Image (cartoon, rainbow, N blue to C red):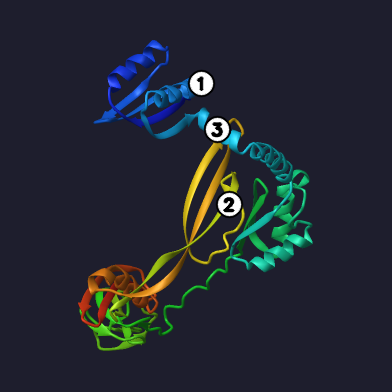
């Protein structure tokens, strides 16, 4: 890994300066020049000497950036307590990872039901994972829940439990019992396949929820008929409307000038730092990785913001209005959206969402 210092400066006679640095046995890398400005990289151990030469020769230093291990060394010099804290934290986490901190439940059962069953078999937050037999826990939990199967997986200090309920087998269908295939929602018939029964609609018809699509009746060539269990597939094109009104204003967030800084540690992808006291804020972060501990030190700067209502044009609010109209239409739909159509009006933005529902 590079262990260098990048120095940006401004001045005249840059070629003569670079020659002088070479005579002083200072290796120079990655020279980038633009007019009177120049940026170079030098070994970290020669950075102080290089900076002193630049100042002695009256060059204006624009910036200094440490690269690679030198960046971590500078950070440690400024925050010498943090490596000690990080080492202690890493040791504590290694020991604490032997215990269960979190139990995450997925599957067909309620989380509270699974948690109660786990307590009955002796598994709860704080249990020693090192002595836990996961296969025995799976079998005991499956018996407690009367489940089809149970999976218990450990990742660090977290237990992931997935329990599946036993499936009920549907009884055989009596095809001689009358059953109409009815629309589950309003829409337009896009396609129809009738396997048993008599079609009551055709492609292009507009139907309402509850309308008969395929009648449970079979008519023979001699004019007689009998009741049947209607079978088939009908695809309906469905839609949902949404609208977002426009009143000539929009909400913006502006900074108040109040700031809050915190320095935290990132371990195993999770950050440990003080909580920001602001409800709304802009965040900027600086991070440094400490090797070979693989620990990241992160400095967060929070700048408080407040919401203000300001005047705005339709064009400035267009994206937000589209999102609001889409959300409004989506809240009244229970189908997967395939296409959408927007209409811009003086009083706002309207949208129509389209999808398909298969009835069988």
Q: Residue at x 51, y 21 (%)?
A: 45
Image quadrant of residue 276? bottom right
Front-most of 266 and 280?
280
Residue 322 image position (x, y, % from top left): 29, 71
Q: Identify the element where label 1 is drawn.
A: helix
Of the numbered discs 3 and 2, the one sitting upstream in the chain is 3
Q: Residue at x 38, y 19 (%)?
A: 28
**Cα–Cα span, label 3 and label 2:** 19 Å
Circles 3 and 1, Cβ within 8 Å, touching? The answer is no
Residue 292 image position (x, y, % from top left): 59, 30
User: Which label was assigned to residue 45?
Assistant: 1
Q: Give the side of residue 96 with respect to residue 2, left or right.
A: right
Looking at the image, is 87 positioned above or below residue 173? above
**Cα–Cα span, label 3 and label 1:** 12 Å
Q: Residue at x 37, y 21 (%)?
A: 29
Circles 3 and 2, Cβ within 8 Å, touching? The answer is no
Q: Residue at x 71, y 39 (%)?
A: 88
Residue 1 image position (x, y, % from top left): 48, 25
Of the numbered discs 2 and 1, the one sitting upstream in the chain is 1
Give the number of callouts: 3
Image quadrant of residue 91? top right
User: Which label was assigned to residue 74?
Assistant: 3
Res. 360 in view: no
Front-most of 220 and 213?
213
> Badge 1 local density, few (<14 within 10 Å), some, or many (20+)?
few
Of the numbered discs 3 and 1, the one sitting upstream in the chain is 1
């Amino acid at each position: 890994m590079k262990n260098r210092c990048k120095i940006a400066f401004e001045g005249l006679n840059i070629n003569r300066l670079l020659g002088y640095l070479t005579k002083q046995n200072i290796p120079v890398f990655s020279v980038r020049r633009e007019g009177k400005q120049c940026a170079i990289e030098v070994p970290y151990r020669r950075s102080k000497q290089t900076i002193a030469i630049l100042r002695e020769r009256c060059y204006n230093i624009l910036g200094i950036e440490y690269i690679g291990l030198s960046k971590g060394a500078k950070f440690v010099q400024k925050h010498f307590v943090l490596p000690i804290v990080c080492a202690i934290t890493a040791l504590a986490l290694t020991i604490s990872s032997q215990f269960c901190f979190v139990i995450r439940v997925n599957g067909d059962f309620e989380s509270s039901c699974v948690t109660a069953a786990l307590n009955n078999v002796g598994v709860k937050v704080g249990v020693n994972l090192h002595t836990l037999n996961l296969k025995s826990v799976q079998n005991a939990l499956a018996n407690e829940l009367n489940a089809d199967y149970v999976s218990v997986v450990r990742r660090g200090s977290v237990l992931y439990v997935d329990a599946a309920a036993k499936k009920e087998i549907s009884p055989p269908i009596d095809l001689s019992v009358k059953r109409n295939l009815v629309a589950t929602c309003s829409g337009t018939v896009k396609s129809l396949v009738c396997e048993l029964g008599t079609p009551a609609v055709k492609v292009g018809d507009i139907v309402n929820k509850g309308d008969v699509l395929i009648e449970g009746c079979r008519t023979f060539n001699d004019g007689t008929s009998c009741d049947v269990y209607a079978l088939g597939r009908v695809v309906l094109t469905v839609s949902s409307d949404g609208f977002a009104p426009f009143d000539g204003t929009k909400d913006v967030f502006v900074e108040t000038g109040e700031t809050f800084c915190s320095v935290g540690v990132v371990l195993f992808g999770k950050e440990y730092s003080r909580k920001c006291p602001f409800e709304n804020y802009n965040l900027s972060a600086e991070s440094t990785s400490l090797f070979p501990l693989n620990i990241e030190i992160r400095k967060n700067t929070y700048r408080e913001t407040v919401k203000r209502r300001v005047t705005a044009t339709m064009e400035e609010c267009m994206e937000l209005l589209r999102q609001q109209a889409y959300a409004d239409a989506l809240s009244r739909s229970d189908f997967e959206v395939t296409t959408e159509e927007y209409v811009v009006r003086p009083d706002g933005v309207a949208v129509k969402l389209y999808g398909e529902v298969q009835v069988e």
